[in-house]
Amino acid sequence: MLQLVRQQRTRYTKRQKNRMDIKVIRSRKRMRTVSARVEQDTLIVHAPAILPQERLDKIVLDFKSRFERKKLKEDLKKKQDLAQVAAGLNAKYFGNQLKINSIEYVTTQNRKFGCCDYTQARIRISHRIGLMPAWVRDYVVVHEMAHLIEPNHSRAFWNIVFRYRLAERAKGYLMAAFRNSDL
Ligand SMILES: [Zn+2]
């Protein structure tokens, strides 16, 4: 498991590309519900005329971050297939011995780079990692894959992880980016 320090999160968010325009349409006819959809990178929100601005702002922000996360996840999936990445690393560093049931990006992991449910052989990687250089991503994937053999950060665990030549450099990269000591 890789922890992510909270204070650095904002900095990273600013670097995200998936910006979205917002168009709010107030309607007198609409009495209760707020709805939203995305059309060509614009978030279109329909809201009742009587809804207080402050509440609407909050709802719009929620919609926006939900759609942005969804889009980012889809973009990452298109750009890099994690199952394929893991298969390559499995061949190179684990002699194809690991069986992974699923490996995917998640946008809900705010404090962790990755996590591994070793009983189910499921790995989740934070979408933040997908935005980093491939060799850093590979380190995180190798790290989580190694947890399938060694659940804890034991000496044996690190011996496996350091089969990956750039492990130390990637740890340094992540530490510098997130001032994190538990990598
Ligand atoms: Zn770990």
Image (spheres, rainbow, N blue to C red):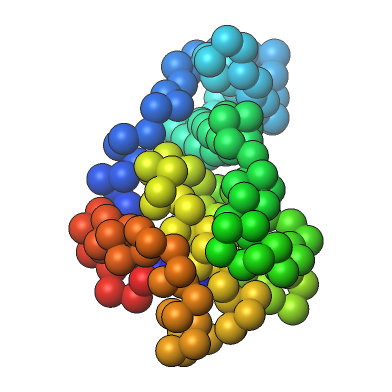
In the displayed structure image, the side of residue 179 where residue 127 appears, left or right: right
Quadrant including the C terminus: bottom left
Asked whether residue 84 appears in the rendered view, the answer is yes
Q: Give the residue furthest to the top.
A: 40
Count of numbered labels shown in the rendering: 0
Q: Position of residue 141 (x, y in %)?
A: 53, 59
Q: Is residue 49 visible?
A: no
Q: Is residue 122 above or below residue 38?
A: below
Is 37 situated left or right of 157 in this image? right
Foreground: 87 or 11? 87
Camera-side residue: 38 or 89? 89
Residue sitting at 61 percent across and 12 percent down? 39
The image position of residue 7, as x and y in percent, is 26, 59
169, above or below 159, in the image: above
Residue at 63% from the left image edge and 80% from the top image edge: 149
Residue 30's place in the image compared with 91, above or below, is above
Q: Residue at x 48, y 43 (%)?
A: 130
Residue at horizontal 53%, vertical 15%?
41
* Observer-nearest of 45 and 55: 45
**Where does residue 51 sit, x and y in percent of width and height?**
54, 29
